[in-house]
Amino acid sequence: MGSAFSVVASVAILRSTVNDIVPEELRTYFWSFTRRFSTEITISIKESHEGSSNRLFYAVVAYLDGHALSNSALPQRLTVGKSEKIRNLMFGLERNSEIVDKFQDVPMKWKYNTDFNSTSQLETRWYELRFHKMQAEMVKNKYLPHILDMAKFLKDQNKIVKFHTVRHDRWSSNRMNLDHPMTFKTLVMDGDLKEKVVKDLDRFRNAKEYYKTIGKVWKRGYLLYGPPGTGKSSLIAAMANYMNYDVYNMNLSAVNSDSTLENLLLHVPSRSILVVEDIDCSIKLTNREAEKSESDSYRGPQVTLAGLLNAIDGLLSCCGEEKITVFTTNYRERIDPALLRPGRMDVHINLSYCTFSTFKQLAANYLEIFNDELFPIIEKLTAKVKVSPADVAGVLMTTENSKTSLEELVKFLENKESEDRSSVAAEQENHNNSNQKIQRQGEAFITDEIGESTNDLMKIEELISKYTIKEELVAILKAMFSKHGDIAANTTLHSMQCISSFLEILCGIIQKLHATKLQDLTEVEVKAMISEVEDLESVKIEVGWLHKRLDEISNAMRLIELKAVSEKLSDTIFGAQVKLTCCETKSLVQGLL
Ligand SMILES: Nc1ncnc2c1ncn2[C@@H]1O[C@H](COP(=O)(O)OP(=O)(O)OP(=O)(O)O)[C@@H](O)[C@H]1O
C-alpha cells in the first residue's frame, strides 16, 4: 500500500516538474503529435463556450456527482462541498484526476483540468472526455444528450424547493426555502385518492412528448376544494416536495390589475407550482357579461375574470412549460363555470371532513397505532360528525400516551356530536316558528294561486324546512316547490347553507320577474339572470323551466329591438311576431309558479 502511494506521488511530482519546465506550446504539440497515432478521440468541455457559460460543462459536473461517481470505481481524489441551493453533499473530480464511466458498455474516460493564468489572474476549468474513434457518433447523438438529461433530472432531485410570494406587484426577491415537511407519505386522504393524485403527477411529469403531439401547452390545473383544515395547503406542500417544483403563492386580492397579473405570471418559470389561494373570496370573479355591465360602476378588486382566464389559458400561458396551477377554495360552487372547465382546472380534488379511513392513516402517522378497541367507536362517530383532519390531528397530539390520545379523541367526537344535535334541534325549532308565521302570511298567496291541498302544503312545509331562506322569499319558494317539486333534490352541493343561498338567488330572479315590466328590463339584466340560472343548473338544481322562460323573454326583447329597427326602415316583415311585445313581463312569467 505504502509503495503504491509512493509510485503515485512520484508520478505526480514528475508530471508537475514536466509542466513547470516544458513550455505549454511544446506540451500541446507533443500531445497532438502522439494523438495522431491514437485510436481515441478527446474532446474538451470548457466552462465557458464562445464567451458565455457552457451548459454542458455544468451538466458534466452534476452528472459526475450524481451518476458516474456513484456507479464507477472511485478515483483516488475527490472534492466535496455543499451549497445553499442544494439538499445533499456534492462530489466532484479533483484537478487532474480521471474516472471511467460506462455508457452502453462503452468506456468513457473523464479527466478534470484547471489552469491558472497568472497575467489575467483567471482560472480556466475544463473536462476532457476520451473515447474510441468508432464511438464518435454515439457520443454525439446519445451520450452527451444523455448527460444533459441526467444532469437536469439530478439537479431537480437535489434542488431545495423555494417559496415565492407577491410583494409590491412582483415576486418577492428574498425567496424562502419551502421547509414544509409534508410529503405524500404523511398526507392523509380518503380511499385511493392519494394514489390517484400521485399517478396524475407522474403522468404529467413524463408527458412532454404527449402534449407536443396533441398540440397543447404542457401545463396542468388543479382545483383543491373543501372546508378549512382538510389539507389543501398540506397537499400543495406534498406536491411541491414530490415534484421538486418551486411554489409561487398568490392571493388575487393583492394583485391590482390584469396587467400586473400578466406580468407576475410571465415571471413564473417552468417547473413551478403557481398557487392561487381562496379563489372564491379573494376577488369578485363574476361571469363575463355581468362583468361588462358592472365595469362602469365597479371600483372594487382589480383583476377581472376575463383577465384571469386570459392569463391562465390565453397566449400568455404558452410562455414556459411544465407548469402546474393550483387553485384553492372552500366553496367550489362559488367559482365561475368558465374557470372550472378542463384546460383551466383539469383535476378537481375534494378534500373533505375526516372519515374513518383518514383517521386510521392519522393514527398510524401520529401514534403508530394500527388498531385498537376504540377504533369501532371512532368509526361510528366519524360517520356522524364533521371534523377536519386538522381537528383530529390536533387532538391526537395532545398527549404523549397513544391510548390517552385515542380516549381524548373519542371524548372530542362525542362532544361534537352532542353539540351538533343540539344546534340541529335549535335550528328545527326556529324553522318551525318561522314557518308557522310564514304559512300564515303566505297561505293566501299559495292557496289562491296554486290551490294546493292542506296535505300537499304540509309536504312542502317539510321540504323547505331544510333550507334557511330569507323570510320575504319563503312564499315564492313554497310556490315554486308546489309547482315543480323539490328542485334541489339531486343537487351536487352538499352544504345546506350553500343550497339555501342558491335557492335564494333563484327566488330573487322570480321576484324580479314578477315585479318588472318587460319594457323596464334590460338585456344585460336578463343575460345575468340566464347566467345565474346556468350556474344553478351546473350544480343540478332543476330550473330548466325558468331557463326556457328566460330565453323566451330574451327573444321577445330582441324582437322589440328588431321592430324598432324595422319601423325605422318602414319594413313590416316582423310586424306579426312583434305583437308579443305589447305584453308585460308578468304575462311572460305567468304559469312559472
Ligand atoms: N389531509 C391531511 N393530512 C395530514 N395532515 C393534515 C391533513 N389535513 C390537515 N392536516 C393537518 O392540519 C393542518 C392544517 O391543514 P391545512 O393547512 O393543510 O388545511 P387547509 O385545508 O389548507 O386549511 P385552510 O382552508 O384553512 O387554509 C396541517 O398542517 C396538518 O398538520
Image (spheres, helix red, strand yellow):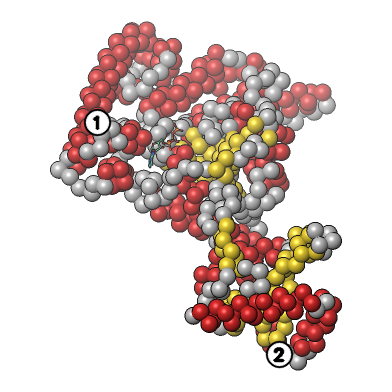
Q: Residue at x 25, y 34 (%)?
A: 399
- Image quarter of the C terminus: top left
Using a 10 Å C-alpha cutoff, classify the residue at mark 2 as few (fewer than 14 neighbours), some (14 to 19) or many (20 or more): few
Identify the element where label 1 is drawn. Answer: helix
Using a 10 Å C-alpha cutoff, classify the residue at mark 1 as few (fewer than 14 neighbours), some (14 to 19) or many (20 or more): many
Residue occupying the far left of the picture: 373
Q: Residue at x 80, y 87 (%)?
A: 33
Q: Is residue 120 left or right of 474 when viewed as pictured? A: right
Q: Residue at x 65, y 77 (%)?
A: 12
Q: Look at mark 2 in the image and give the residue it sits on.
A: 39
Q: Is residue 548 visible?
A: no
Pick the residue in front: 494 or 250: 250
Q: Is residue 19 above or below residue 241?
A: below
Residue 413 has which mark? Answer: 1
Q: Is residue 494 above or below residue 102?
A: above
Q: Residue at x 67, y 82 (%)?
A: 131
- Mark 1 beta carbon near ligand 1 (under 8 Å): no
Quarter of the rendering containing residue 581: top right
Quarter of the rendering containing residue 296: top right
Pick the residue in front: 477 or 50: 50
Q: Is residue 190 visible?
A: yes
